[in-house]
Amino acid sequence: MVASELSHVHTRPIDFVCDSDARSMLNKVKDFQEEMKNCSAVDALPFSIQLPCVGIHKATWERKSVHEWRADILLSLETLAQDVQSARTLSQPGCRLTLLERLERNINNYLLVVKLLHIEGEQVEHQAEGCQGQRSTDLGLVLKNFGLLLIGKLEWLISELENGC
């Protein structure tokens, strides 16, 4: 699945952790934002999307286990993927639909990689503390928050896993 956007990069999760170029290439947010500029009337979505919670309270975050970090990120990605899919199914053919299809595929690629990351330690089922992020029909805001999730919480998780490289 990751290969659908990155045909020349290995798709193993350890490559994602150890290769910042692979992570950079998978992050398509800037491409989507650029496409959005060239697509008229794409800003307003037909469905309100819950924005991922991207803020990190450092002391609280550091008290959580790496497994809890992953659960938090997965919950954000899963919610975002579901809402983008709903917006996509309500969209008319055109550039907005194409952009939402690509965004959904990109989010699902991240979901796959994060799910497959090998994390040492006890695999206790952790319930993510789902924050209730605000909802928005502004695609620009959705893309901004998705990007912040990737460069914030996900990179923090990756930095903890890099010692396995």
Image (cartoon, grey):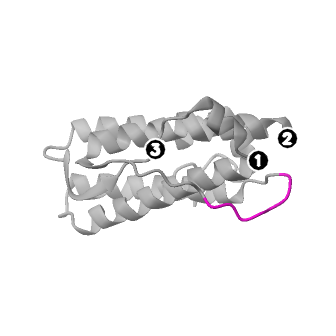
Mark 2 residue crowding within 10 angstroms, few (<14) / some (14–19) / many (20+)? few
Quarter of the figure with residue 81: bottom left
Q: Residue at x 65, y 47 (%)?
A: 69
Quarter of the figure with residue 102: bottom left
Of the image marks 1 and 3, the number of the one nearer the N terminus? 1
Q: Is residue 55 above or below residue 136?
A: above
**Distance from label 1 to label 3 (Cα)?**
26 Å
Q: Amino acid at mark 2?
A: Gly
Q: Position of residue 52 (x, y in %)?
A: 44, 47
Q: Please, what secondary structure does the residue beneath circle 2 have?
A: helix
- Our reading of the magenta stretch's main secondary structure is loop
**Callout 1 touching callout 3 (CB < 8 Å):** no
Q: Position of residue 49 (x, y in %)?
A: 31, 55
**Callout 3 touching callout 2 (CB < 8 Å):** no
Of the image marks 3 and 2, the number of the one nearer the N terminus? 3
**Callout 2 touching callout 1 (CB < 8 Å):** yes
Q: Residue at x 47, y 35 (%)?
A: 148
User: In the picture provided, is 150 more to the left or to the right than 163?
Assistant: left
Q: Please, what secondary structure does the residue beneath circle 3 have?
A: loop
Indicate which label's residue lies in the foreground, 2 or 1.
Answer: 2
Q: Which residue is mark 2?
A: 164
Q: Position of residue 140 (x, y in %)?
A: 28, 39
Which segment did they paint magenta?
Answer: 120-127
**Distance from label 3 to label 2 (Cα)?**
28 Å
Mark 1 residue crowding within 10 angstroms, few (<14) / some (14–19) / many (20+)? some
User: In the picture provided, is 81 more to the left or to the right than 11?
Assistant: left
Q: Which residue is mark 3?
A: 53
Q: Which residue is mark 1?
A: 14
Q: Amino acid at mark 3?
A: Cys
